[in-house]
Amino acid sequence: MSFVRNAWYPAAWSHELGRALVPRTMLGEKVVLYRTEAGAPVALEDRCCHKFLPLSKGKLKGDAVECGYHGMTYAPTGVCIRIPGQANIPAQARVRAYPAVDHLGLVWIWAGAASLADRAKLFQLPPYGAPGWTANKGPYTYIKAAYQHLTDNLLDPAHVSFVHLSTLGSAAMEEIPVETRQDGDTVVTSRWTLDQPPVPVFRAFRDIPGNVDRWQIYQFYPPSLSVTDFGIGPVGMGHGDADRDKGMRIHSCHFIAPETERTSHYFWMQIRNFAPGDEAVSRTMTEQFIMAFAEDKAVLEAVQQGEDESEGRVPVRLGIDNGPQRSRRIVERMIRAEQDAAPGAASGRGAQALFDRKPEQNSGGASRGMKVK
């Protein structure tokens, strides 16, 4: 399987991970997640090195994981620290440990070479936790579609008029062209809808008389993160960052990790500049977006099924595919760079082969960061 591996990927909501063993497949690899007694997140290969029973079928012993078959016990570093009935522990008795950190309310794991894990490469989201901004988090969502179908969708303002009429879209937006630009490895698609009634999601929070100007700015950060800056303001408003801050502004954040080539983990939240700290508004917003993203889920899973059944037919490309195609080319380039730097790094077995070598032999890299437009 070909994925960018030297990157941070979201594995779980921070508040959902505790003193229980949580199995999860990440980029085709079986991982078990838990927290130490001090609360630090841990991610280990979910496979005992003896008979390969998943460690998630064992139990926690302090900060270590005891295999449920013969009691081999592994420290958070992945090193075996106990073999019942055997004093000598072979040097190769260990499992892979993935660097794991809490950030933006999520547990992130580094899927590539541990020696390259760098906290400075964690995705930065300036409005998160800033004064005047309030976050609401949605439920973990499992989607039976390749992660790039999700990132395509999150660079596609055009679908909103057809998929989300009950929440985010309106027929008035159908014929408005989509603008695309690229800033390094960040791809941005945008559209302004001028002098039109507000869409349902904003009317749910405020009585808005008359028409508004509305913006949608979709920002993709490789390999699989997206932030949609959208909102409404008075007709004739300016289009700059400070102008948008004066309107009702939302950053809708989409943190995606591939499970396999055809399935994905999806975590989302919104950060808004209105109704600060209002829990009722947060609950209503979450409910609205659960409905909207359920519509996306149904479409994307049907798209994946259609692709699987297409027998290699090449899809027709449209102008609105400019952004998604750019994002895919960026990811392809990152994968090739990893393959060139460390042959085999883009396959599940290749990554394990890298783990089996000395850490200093591993190489490759990727970086992240949000720019608020």
Image: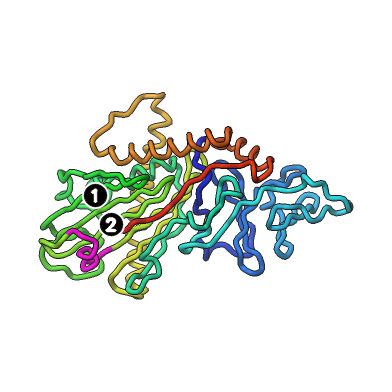
Dot 1 or dot 2: first in sequence order is 1
Q: Can you tell which quarter of the image residue 350 is in?
A: top right
Q: Magenta span has 238?
A: no
The CA span between labels 1 and 2 is 11 Å
Spot occupied by residue 255 in the image (x, y as percentages of width and height): 43, 53
For image coordinates 71% across by 54% down, the residue present is: 58
| Callout 1–callout 2 Cβ contact below 8 Å | yes
Q: Which mark is residue 373?
A: 2
Q: Quadrant of the C terminus?
A: bottom left
Which region shows up in magenta? 239-249
Three-letter amino acid code at disc 1? Ser
The residue lying toward the viewer, choosing from 312 and 76, is: 76
Say left or right for 270 vs 41: left
Looking at the rendered structure, the secondary structure element under dot 2 is loop
Spot occupied by residue 195 in the image (x, y as percentages of width and height): 10, 58
Say left or right for 175 vs 257: left
Q: Which mark is residue 211?
A: none
Say left or right for 60 vs 336: right
For image coordinates 25% across by 39% down, the residue present is: 320
The residue lying toward the viewer, choosing from 262 and 239, is: 239
Three-letter amino acid code at disc 2? Lys
The residue tagged 1 is 190
